[in-house]
Image (cartoon, coloured by chain):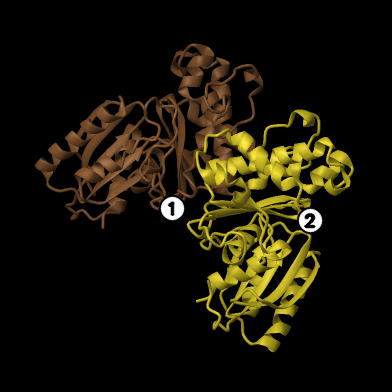
Chain colours: A brown, B yellow
Amino acid sequence: MPLATDTRIFGAIEAGGTKFVCAVGNAQGDILAQTRFPTGEPTYTLATMLDFLKKQQDNFGAYAAIGLGCFGPLELDAASPRYGHILRTPKLGWSETDVVGPIAQEFSCPIGFDTDVNGAALAEHTWGSARDVEDLVYLTVGTGIGGGVIVNGKTITGLMHPEVGHLFPRRHPLDANFKGICPFHDDCLEGLASGTAIMARTGSSLDQLDISHPQWQIEADYLGQLCAQLVLTVSPRRIVIGGGVMSQTRLLPMIREQTLHWLHGYIDRREITTGVDGYIVLPGLGANAGVLGALALAMCAAP
Amino acid sequence: MPLATDTRIFGAIEAGGTKFVCAVGNAQGDILAQTRFPTGEPTYTLATMLDFLKKQQDNFGAYAAIGLGCFGPLELDAASPRYGHILRTPKLGWSETDVVGPIAQEFSCPIGFDTDVNGAALAEHTWGSARDVEDLVYLTVGTGIGGGVIVNGKTITGLMHPEVGHLFPRRHPLDANFKGICPFHDDCLEGLASGTAIMARTGSSLDQLDISHPQWQIEADYLGQLCAQLVLTVSPRRIVIGGGVMSQTRLLPMIREQTLHWLHGYIDRREITTGVDGYIVLPGLGANAGVLGALALAMCAAP
């Protein structure tokens, strides 16, 4: 936990596929200034971001570091010539865009760069629902599905970074015929269980459907499968699950139940078997997890 | 990599569900003495193991540390009163057995304790097929299916430890009716794709089936799904895959092909897209990965 006497100032950029949130914050997790705007084409969007950072630096003084939590997939390997680029993405115009380079040209401070969801995981670990554990997953279920993973207190990078939204769940018996909406895989998790998929399948968002509608069971099943797959692979001590779809909080106990169903008693740990209400939880930072994630990335990058 | 001048001596125990391998080794990965015996009931088996370690200590001098790589599930949390125990397991008589305690009573040196597969991953990282990467998965496909995961050079523990053999693949179209043999989940990966499952489904082991038999495609599909799920969750820089079933090396290129099929171009990294032959590989240590894993665990535990 950062000291209250730490007076450093950080730049923080949450670069989402739908919107950019740009902020200035301190090591206590306070946001001192903030702006948000829709994600347009790259040149204009990045210029708007830089304008904000430069103006705020005049107000607050030089940044100790800048954090950028970005929609993926990303090149995170500092040894690669493509470091700091967005890789091939369905987001129009953004494939192969260098997002770190323009910041580095304007600012000489260190730049922390990771996926938006790894950043959010770090924020939940620093200030939110997972302060007491060193191993956690942060999931967001909204327009798409993404996940950040922290092991031994550090985000997973590895070859690329986790892309848990593209795991492939087993089909729910009541969902045999929906094709799925992922441009890469059709019926991966994002293709079947994102907000976009719910809309494509039912013509409605989840909040517009009565709790008796099968979509609720289908959604809980797919997200329960995701949680179970994460338990079996990265063995987190907590799963934090947010995003627009999760604002329907009735879904949370259903997901917990489905997670236990898929694990079927094999993971013999009371944290899961009897403690699942504290194991799969909502974000402590709510919708701020993203921008605070960028702030946490900045703090990790600072000397 | 350890120095050639390091003269320390370590005890190494590979405690498998089928057999125990007990050895004495050095920091260069040389096995100086070894014995193996079938895994019987716990009291007798652990006593035989201790006898070996005590006798060899008379020959080689005091151990700098002892490593125990054990079949799971295990309690790895040093803060838990059950630390060092095997948890609920289908292996008759071994549930709730304390495997570390008896060693600690006889020897005052540090004891490294982890799953057999996390140990094997560490051995492949130290001396085998994954020396050049810090993020890897080691899989074994034999009587059962297990996997060890290393992130940033350290094995994953988290809440328990990875149990990737119990992930649930999608059913292969030619395998709709086989119930599966996992006592917990029926048709999880181990229930569908372990050597035991192959035998239950076809009445034969894989090597007895002609390459035109659908079992080959079914097996490659399930193991390809496993590799793809691991890429999407823990993002390894290499997947090392061994065990009895993999002694049928014709399977390896089929698994690579199925992994790419399931990822469907989404992971835009040349290490996978064009370099898959170097990404999914056989163990460099062959059948010795297990006992060398125990040796690596000892080395990590030594001061």
Q: What amino acid does circle 1 point to?
A: Glu
Q: Is residue A16 above or below residue B25?
A: above
Which numbered circle lies on residue A134? 1
Number of dots carrying numbers = 2
State the residue position of label 2. B92
Q: Is residue B145 left or right of residue A200?
A: right
Residue at mark 2 to residue at mark 1: CA–CA distance: 34 Å
Furthest residue toward top: A203
Which numbered circle lies on residue A195? none
Residue at image point 72% right, 41% down:
B220
Q: Position of residue B235 (x, y in %)?
A: 52, 46
Q: Is residue A110 left or right of residue A147?
A: left
Q: Nearer the viewer, residue B12 or B226?
A: B226
Q: Is residue B66 above or below residue A257?
A: below
Secondary structure of the residue carrying tag 2 is loop
Secondary structure of the residue carrying tag 1 is loop
Q: What amino acid does circle 2 point to?
A: Leu
In the image, are marks 2 and 1 on the same chain? no
Q: Is residue B192 left or right of residue B279?
A: right
Q: Is residue B221 above or below residue B241?
A: above
Q: Chain of mark 2?
A: B
Q: Position of residue B194 (x, y in %)?
A: 76, 46
State yes or no: discs 2 and 1 in contact (Cβ < 8 Å): no
Residue at image point 42% right, 52% down:
A154
- The crowd level at tag 2 (other Cα within 10 Å; few <14, some 14-19, many 20+) is few
Residue A273 visible in the picture: no
Q: Position of residue B40 (x, y in %)?
A: 81, 64
Q: Nearer the viewer, residue A27 or B139?
A: B139
- The crowd level at tag 1 (other Cα within 10 Å; few <14, some 14-19, many 20+) is some
Q: Chain of mark 1?
A: A
Q: Position of residue B108 (x, y in %)?
A: 58, 80
